[in-house]
Image: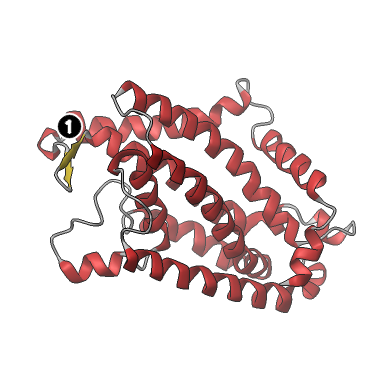
Amino acid sequence: MFSIFKEHKGFGKQIMLLAVNDLKKTYKGAAIGPLWAVIKPAFTLFVYWFAFSVGLKSAGDISWAGQEFPRFVFMLVGFIPWFFITDSITLGAKSIRMNQQYVTKVSFPVSTIMTFTALARLFVHLFLSVIMYVILLCYGYMPSVYNLQFFLYCPLMYMFFVMLTWSTAPMAAFSKDFENMIVSIMSGIFWLTGVIYNSYDLGIPWLEKAMLLNPINFFVNGYRNAFIYNTWFFENKLELIIFLAEFVLVFALGIFNYNRLRKRLPDVL
């Protein structure tokens, strides 16, 4: 743990610059550049809005805890953390291989590669969150003290998925198959999260409990708690306890896998 923190010490400015450079590199050569970071999720949201609001009108709105939410608003608040999560997982797993020059050609702290890769995605996430908030205001969702939970869920989400990449990025650097597996299963994981449906209200009690084991659901539901449910994070004690246990587990496994594999990375790459 201390070795990872030590690697970050004194590299704050470099991490910030590399995160910005990573964004520039992602959209290099595109005429509209970083606007693609908004166009891609906006098109995804439009497709789902059209499918459920126009094509499947019977789907209707979402009802929960005596409140009714427009399906588009419900999905919007779920998709915003999902866009960050899916990019953090897939690009985080590829981060060492995509930035192998920092491992093989220069003396650079390897763990910071995962940090600046996720930070670049965080910049996009914050911009999309502002757009989401404006849309919610247009739909009549007024500012609330519950909105302040964003400043809990967002940093926690960033830390959780950076720690996850402490395991996945070194393993993906060793095995291209592992990297491909992560990319392949992400589309399936989407349907196991409550992005487009309410994971609290599945009508099957044991399945609703099982869905709490998915940490992605913690953040999707957390954003809805903050912006539309008007619920505090500690009100669902079981969900919070399960997530904290998973947070500690991911942290411990990340430290173990990173320290186990980092010295062999230059030879493998």
In the figure, is residue 46 to the left or right of 112? Answer: left
Query: Eyeballing the image, is 219 above or below 267?
Result: above
Determine the secondary structure under disc 1. helix
Residue at x 42% of width, y 62% of height = 215
Q: Quadrant of residue 126?
A: top right
Residue 74 vertical placement versus 54 (above, below): below
In the image, what residue occupies the spot 59% across and 75% down? 253
* Image x and y of residue 65, in percent: 17, 48
- Residue 59 showing in the rendered view: yes
Residue at the image point whose x is 57% and y is 67% from the top: 177
Q: Residues within 10 Å of mark 1 (few under 14, many from 20)?
A: few
Front-most of residues 154 and 97: 154
Residue farthest to the front, as pictured: 145
Q: Position of residue 56 (x, y in %)?
A: 15, 36
Tell me the residue that label 1 is attached to.
Answer: 55
User: Is 265 or 162 nearer to us in this picture?
Assistant: 162
Image point (39%, 70%), residue name: 242
- Quadrant containing the C terminus is bottom right
The amino acid on which the numbered mark 1 sits, given as a three-letter code, is: Gly
Residue 224, quarter of picture:
top left
